[in-house]
Image (tube, rainbow, N blue to C red):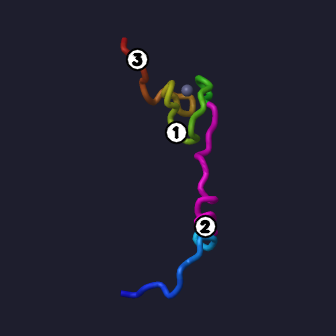
C-alpha cells in the first residue's frame, strides 16, 4: 500500500482546511412577509406556513 513520503505539517493541513471551511457559510435568510419571522430564502415559513403570499402549510391549526 502506498504511503506518504513525508509528514504533512500542521500549517499545511490547516491551510488546506481553511480554504474549504472558509467557503462554508450560513444559509441566506430573509424576513417572512406574512409574520416577520426570519426564514430561509425559497423556503416555506416555519412559523406561519406561508410562501410567496400563500398559505402552504397549516401550522398549529387545531380547529
Ligand atoms: Zn411567516
In percent of width and height, residue 6 lies at: 53, 85
Mark 2, mark 3: which one is toward the viewer? 2
Q: Earlier in the sequence, mark 3 or mark 1?
A: 1
In percent of width and height, residue 15 lies at: 63, 69
Q: Which residue is identified by label 2?
A: 14
Determine whether 57 is above or below 30 in the image. Answer: above
Foreground of the two, 17 or 57: 17
Q: Residue at x 61, y 73 (%)?
A: 12
Q: Secondary structure at mark 2?
A: helix
CA gap between label 2 and label 3 equals 50 Å
Q: Which residue is identified by label 1?
A: 43
| Quarter placement of the C terminus | top left
Determine whether 40 is above or below 32 in the image. Answer: below
Foreground of the two, 9 or 44: 9
Magenta range: 15-31
Q: Earlier in the sequence, mark 1 or mark 2?
A: 2
Determine whether 47 is above or below 16 in the image. Answer: above
Mark 1, mark 2: which one is toward the viewer? 2
Foreground of the two, 52 or 11: 11
Q: Residue at x 53, y 33 (%)?
A: 51
Name which quarter of the figure residue 61 lies in: top left
Q: Is residue 19 magenta?
A: yes
Q: Secondary structure at mark 1?
A: loop
Q: Which residue is identified by label 3?
A: 61
Q: Is the C-beta separation of discs 3 and 1 under 8 Å?
A: no
Foreground of the two, 34 or 25: 25
Q: Residue at x 52, y 28 (%)?
A: 50
Q: Residue at x 43, y 23 (%)?
A: 59
Q: Earlier in the sequence, mark 2 or mark 3?
A: 2
Amino acid at each position: 500500500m502506498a504511503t506518504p513520503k513525508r509528514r504533512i505539517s500542521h500549517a499545511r493541513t490547516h491551510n488546506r482546511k481553511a480554504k474549504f471551511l472558509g467557503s462554508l457559510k450560513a444559509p441566506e435568510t430573509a424576513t417572512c412577509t406574512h409574520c416577520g419571522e426570519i426564514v430561509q430564502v425559497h423556503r416555506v415559513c416555519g412559523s406561519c406556513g406561508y410562501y410567496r403570499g400563500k398559505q402552504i402549510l397549516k401550522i398549529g391549526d387545531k380547529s
